[in-house]
Amino acid sequence: MGLMAEFDRPVKVMKVGIDSPTPGTHVEIRTAPGPNASIAQTRLIASGQLGGGHTEIAVDPPTDQASTHVLVWLTELGPAGSRFQSKITEVQFTVAE
């Protein structure tokens, strides 16, 4: 499951900020060739685990390929008692100028 961001022009992502009240969620940041791309068609550029609140995930080294579509892919939900859940309230992208 994930969130696809679409930009007006191709961008080179430097870092992604994610606000989440549910710590423990694991995410991957991926570029995609289009809005309906399969996960196999995307390119992994960064990954991380969300803390409670704001988490910044740096693309290291910064991607050299610009894309109009960036996917925040949830690979593991955070623990919530005996269940698992994740909530994302905001996503911010820092891009190269």
Image (tube, grey):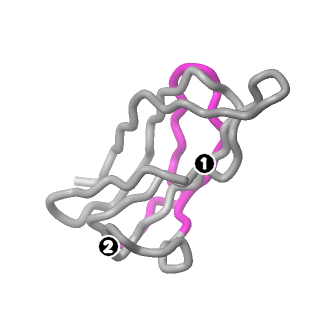
User: Which residue: 51% across, 55% down?
Assistant: 29
**In the image shown, does 91 or 3 lie closer to the viewer?**
3
Mark 2 or mark 1, which is nearer the start of the sequence?
1
Residue 57, quarter of the rendered image: top right
Residue 92: % across, % down: 36, 38
Residue 27: give x, y in percent of width and height. 60, 48
Q: Is residue 18 left or right of residue 84?
A: left
Queried whether the magenta region covers residue 64, the answer comes back as yes
55 magenta-colored: yes
| Picture residue at 48% right of the left edge, 73% below the top | 42
Amino acid, disc 2: Gly
20 over 33 or under it: above or below: above
Tags 1 and 2 touching, CB below 8 Å: no
Q: Amino acid at mark 1?
A: Val
Look at the picture and state if 70 lies above or below 81.
below
**Which of the two residues, 28 or 59, is positioned nearer the viewer here?**
28
Q: Quadrant of residue 31?
A: bottom left
* Secondary element at tag 1: strand
The residue beneath circle 2 is 34
Q: Is residue 12 left or right of residue 29?
A: left
Which element is circle 2 on?
Answer: loop
Residue 36, how many percent across, how many down?
Answer: 36, 71
Residue 35 sits in quarter: bottom left
Residue that appears at 61% across and 52% down: 47
- Magenta-colored span: 44-66
How many marks on residues? 2
The residue drawn where x is 35% and y is 76% is: 33
Q: Label 1: which residue?
A: 27
In the displayed structure, does residue 72 sit left or right of residue 48?
left
Judging depth in this view, the residue of 66 and 49 nearest the camera is 49
Q: CA distance from mark 1 to mark 2?
A: 19 Å
